Image (cartoon, rainbow, N blue to C red):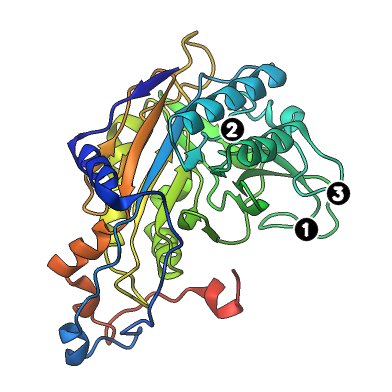
């Protein structure tokens, strides 16, 4: 598979790594100096500690368009994960619906249970690969077969399908599962019409999880269009927002990179709690374009964006691996230069994270 080169910004981060940043280390946090009620004048004068440099290498695996051959799709993903790990990545990301064609008729036939006693092929491979290479693996998404839970599934339903992303830790196994919360239902006359809700059920919550490389927030594709969701994940301390996705060739050229950069800018400062150690990068990972010209046409262009909305690394529509180095101290520096946290008008507006109120993770 092709390995894309990072941009100058990512190269600078790599240079910082070689000069002493070293491997990723556990992140630290300090008490938040302000709350939703607004920041005080003394908060603005509070000196911002400079954390030790911490650079994390990530790999976005833009896999070839999946076919109906699930075994071949799994083998292709396993090889990409191996190549990414051998390239030095500590965090590896796969695309949306990588184990089957992106089509409503394909989802039921390729669906798997997650977390059940009987191992399933896609989930087993992801768990084994994360352990074998000792990486954090955001396993793209697959169709999940659930039982009567979630946004649209009643307790009496025996069979519900989700678009689900699993997160694995090399030492701890499966540590999180995100079910796509905003289903892709669109109808653009003469261009594209698709309704995920014809077969899939929406998820019931947000997903933010602590990993060996930092705190990760996960969304899937259409989720990236909802800034409130990204803000809620940032409020829960996400260092990196990750969106496996499969934008199409109609909306992709206009919105894919734009939305990713917007989410990075939105979350330079968090709405409810803020600390000088909080940071937010945005990663997207797409499948490659379908070269047959048939079926769903993904936009590709898997991309890593930094906290100042700069594109750190990207690619085109072809299969390949995008490598980027995330300097997790960059957000601290950017926030020091543009202190939005102390300028927000908490007396006029605030984000109410209902999940946090309920005590959700």
Residue position marked by numbered label 1 in the rendering: 154
Helix, strand or loop under label 1: loop
Q: Are marks 1 and 3 in contact (CB under 8 Å)?
A: no
Q: Are marks 2 and 3 in contact (CB under 8 Å)?
A: no
Circle 3 crowding by C-alpha within 10 Å: few under 14, some 14–19, many from 20:
few
Residue position marked by numbered label 2 in the rendering: 97
For the question of whether residue 359 can be seen, the reply is yes
**Residue 361: % across, % down:** 59, 68
Residue 95 is marked as none
Which mark is nearer the camera, 2 or 1? 2
Return the residue nearer the eye: 274 or 357.
274
- Tell me the quadrant of the picture where the N terminus can be found: top left
Q: Distance between the residues labelled 2 and 1?
A: 24 Å
Looking at the image, the residue that sits furthest to the left is: 337
Helix, strand or loop under label 2: loop
Looking at the image, the residue that sits furthest to the top is: 292
Q: Which residue is rendered at x = 86% and y = 49% of the image?
A: 158
268 relative position to 122: left or right: left
Residue 256 position by quadrant? top left
Helix, strand or loop under label 3: loop
137 relative position to 115: left or right: left
Q: Which residue is rendered at x = 43% and y = 62% of the image?
A: 238
Q: Earlier in the sequence, mark 2 or mark 1?
A: 2
Q: Which of marks 2 and 3 is nearer the N terminus?
A: 2
Q: Distance between the residues labelled 2 and 3?
A: 23 Å
**Residue 283: % across, % down:** 39, 44
Which mark is nearer the camera, 2 or 3? 2
Q: Is residue 186 above or below residue 205?
A: above
Q: Is residue 242 above or below residue 143?
A: below
Q: Do the residues labelled 2 and 1 touch (CB within 8 Å)?
A: no
Residue 349 position by quadrant? bottom left
Residue position marked by numbered label 3 in the rendering: 158
């Amino acid at each position: 598979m092709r390995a894309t080169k990072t941009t100058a910004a990512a190269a600078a981060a790599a240079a910082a790594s070689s000069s002493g940043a070293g491997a990723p280390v556990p992140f630290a946090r300090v008490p938040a100096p302000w709350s939703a009620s607004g920041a005080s004048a003394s908060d603005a004068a509070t000196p911002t500690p400079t954390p030790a440099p911490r650079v994390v290498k990530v790999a976005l695996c833009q896999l070839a368009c999946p076919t109906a051959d699930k075994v071949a799709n799994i083998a292709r993903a396993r090889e990409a994960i191996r190549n990414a790990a051998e390239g030095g990545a500590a965090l590896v990301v796969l695309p949306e619906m990588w184990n089957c064609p992106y089509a409503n008729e394909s989802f039921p036939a390729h669906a798997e249970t997650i977390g059940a006693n009987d191992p399933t092929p896609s989930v087993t491979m992801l768990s084994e690969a994360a352990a074998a290479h000792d990486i954090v693996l955001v396993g793209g998404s697959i169709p999940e077969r659930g039982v009567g839970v979630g946004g649209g599934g009643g307790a009496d339903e025996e069979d519900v399908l989700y678009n689900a992303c699993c997160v694995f830790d090399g030492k701890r196994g499966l540590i999180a599962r995100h079910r796509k919360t905003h289903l892709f239902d669109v109808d653009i006359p003469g261009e594209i019409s698709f309704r995920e809700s014809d077969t899939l059920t929406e998820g019931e919550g947000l997903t933010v999880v602590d990993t060996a490389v930092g705190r990760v927030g996960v969304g899937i594709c259409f989720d990236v269009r909802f800034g409130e969701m990204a803000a809620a994940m940032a409020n829960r301390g996400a260092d990196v927002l990750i969106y496996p996705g499969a934008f199409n060739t109609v909306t992709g050229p206009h919105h894919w990179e734009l939305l990713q950069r917007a989410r990075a800018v939105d979350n330079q400062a968090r709405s409810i709690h803020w600390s000088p150690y909080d940071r937010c990068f945005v990663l997207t990972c797409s499948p490659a374009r379908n070269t047959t010209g048939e079926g769903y046409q993904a936009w590709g262009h898997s991309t890593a964006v930094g906290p100042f909305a700069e594109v750190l690394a990207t690619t085109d529509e072809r299969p390949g691996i995008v490598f980027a180095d995330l300097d997790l101290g960059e957000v601290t520096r950017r926030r020091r230069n543009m202190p939005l946290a102390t300028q927000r008008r908490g007396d006029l507006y605030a984000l109410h994270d209902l999940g946090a109120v309920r005590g959700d993770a």
